């Protein structure tokens, strides 16, 4: 890990990811957001949840962002990048991050707490599978930081799943 990567202000970037999630919520979508920061802290991409308009159950913000990133940068570049996401990447999204060659994930809301908030909602059958377990199954390390600012992240979801 480079010194520049280590010096990133995780709470600042995570709150920016919360703003992306808020935009998704304000537009009537699922309240998830993610952004990709380069080693120097430059925001390279951001992504709202993409469930709507087509009801794409795989349209998670993190997965879509990782697909876009992998088509733009090589794994060598992505190894120096950080994915900031409003909620812990599910197994699918963690797999996408792993396959892109991403170096670090920082998330707000844990999968366990998200599952408690969503219940058995058919649009979000949340897994209780920590992303660390997915990454630990791989052949290369992915640094994980989180949950971080979890109450702020949870606030985006508090009323959504009972009304959706």
Image (cartoon, rainbow, N blue to C red):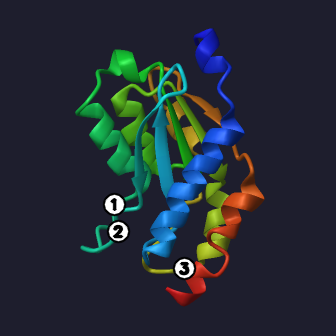
Image coordinates of residue 135 in percent, x first then y, are 51, 33
Q: Which mark is residue 11?
A: none
Image coordinates of residue 35 in percent, x first then y, are 47, 43
Q: Secondary structure at mark 2?
A: loop
Quarter of the image where the N terminus is located: top right
Which residue is pictured at 66% across the width and 19% down the height? 6
For the residues marked 1 and 2, what is the alpha-carbon distance in whole angstroms? 5 Å
Image coordinates of residue 69 in percent, x first then y, are 32, 35
Q: Is residue 28 left or right of residue 108?
A: left
Which residue is pictured at 36% across the width and 15% down the height? 76
The residue labelled by disc 1 is 59
Which residue is pictured at 73% across the width and 46% down the height? 148
**Circle nearer the N terminus (3, 2):** 2
**Circle nearer the N terminus (1, 2):** 2
The residue labelled by disc 2 is 51
The answer to whether residue 51 is above or below residue 161 is: above
View extreme (bottom): residue: 163
Disc 1 vs disc 2: Cβ atoms closer than 8 Å?
yes
Q: Nearer the viewer, mark 3 or mark 2?
A: 2
Q: Is residue 42 left or right of residue 132?
A: left
View extreme (top): residue: 2
Q: Nearer the viewer, residue 82 or 15?
A: 15
Q: Secondary structure at mark 3?
A: loop
Q: Nearer the viewer, residue 122 or 105?
A: 105
Q: Which mark is residue 120?
A: 3
Q: Secondary structure at mark 1?
A: loop
Number of residues whose C-alpha sits closer than 10 Å to that of mark 3, classed few (under 14), some (14–19) or many (20 or more): few
For the residues marked 3 and 2, what is the alpha-carbon distance in whole angstroms? 17 Å
The answer to whether residue 63 is above or below residue 52 is: above
């Amino acid at each position: 890990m480079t010194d520049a990567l280590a010096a990133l202000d995780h709470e600042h970037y995570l709150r920016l990811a919360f703003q992306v999630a808020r935009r998704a919520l304000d537009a009537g979508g699922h309240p998830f957001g993610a952004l990709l920061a380069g080693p120097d802290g430059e925001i390279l991409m951001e992504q709202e949840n993409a469930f709507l308009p087509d009801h794409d159950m795989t349209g998670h913000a993190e997965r879509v962002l990782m697909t876009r990133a992998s088509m733009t940068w090589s794994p060598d570049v992505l190894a120096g990048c950080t994915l900031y996401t409003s909620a812990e990447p599910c197994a699918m999204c963690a797999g996408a991050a792993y396959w892109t060659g991403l170096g670090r994930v920082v998330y707000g809301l844990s999968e366990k707490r998200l599952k408690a908030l969503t219940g058995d909602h058919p649009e979000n059958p949340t897994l209780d599978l920590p992303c660390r377990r997915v990454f630990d199954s791989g052949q290369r390390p992915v640094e994980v930081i989180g949950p971080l600012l979890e109450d702020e992240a949870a606030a985006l979801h508090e009323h959504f799943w009972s009304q959706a």
